[in-house]
């Protein structure tokens, strides 16, 4: 069951990014920062999969 706008969602690209301070690239907690970002982005990824019919 879709919506009238669903076909148009398939034509879009979404990019998720996070700016990092160059110092944070040497931070021992960089892995935790990346995991937290991935968790924050997960709802958008799931939305995209659903719009494309992968879920």
Image: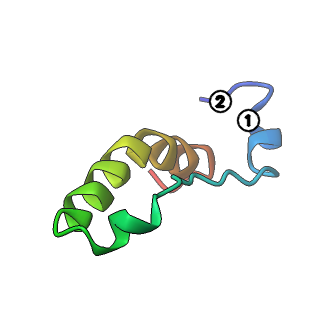
- Identify the residue at image location x=44%, y=50%: 55
Furthest-top residue in this view: 3
Nearer-the-camera pick, 42 or 33: 33
Residue 28 in percent (x, y) is at 16, 69
Nearer-the-camera pick, 16 or 2: 16
For residue 25, side relative to residue 44 (left or right): left
- Identify the residue at image location x=78%, y=50%: 12
- Where, quadrant-wise, is the N terminus in this rendering? top right
* Element assignment for label 1: helix
Q: Is residue 19 above or below residue 30?
A: above
**Pointer 1 with pointer 2, Cβ within 8 A:** yes
Residue 20 in percent (x, y) is at 47, 58
Residue 31 in percent (x, y) is at 22, 67
Nearer-the-camera pick, 3 or 28: 28
Real-space Cα distance between discs 1 and 2? 6 Å
For residue 9, side relative to residue 17 (left or right): right
Residue 34 in percent (x, y) is at 32, 60
For residue 49, side relative to residue 15 (left or right): left
- Identify the residue at image location x=24%, y=67%: 27
- Residue at the spot of label 1: 6
How would you rate the neighbour count of disc 2 (Cα within 10 Å): few for under 14, some for 14-19, many for 20 or more? Answer: few
Nearer-the-camera pick, 10 or 25: 25
* Among the 4 quarters of the image, the one containing residue 29: bottom left
The colour scheme used to paint the residues is: rainbow
* Element assignment for label 2: loop
- Identify the residue at image location x=57%, y=48%: 48
Numbered badge on residue 2: 2
How would you rate the neighbour count of disc 1 (Cα within 10 Å): few for under 14, some for 14-19, many for 20 or more? Answer: few
Q: Is residue 35 above or below residue 44?
A: below
For residue 42, side relative to residue 44 (left or right): left
């Amino acid at each position: 069951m879709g919506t009238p706008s669903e076909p148009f969602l398939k034509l879009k690209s979404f990019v998720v990014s996070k700016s990092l301070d160059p110092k944070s690239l040497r931070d021992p907690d960089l892995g935790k920062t990346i995991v937290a970002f991935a968790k924050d982005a997960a709802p958008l990824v799931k939305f995209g999969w659903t719009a494309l019919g992968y879920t």
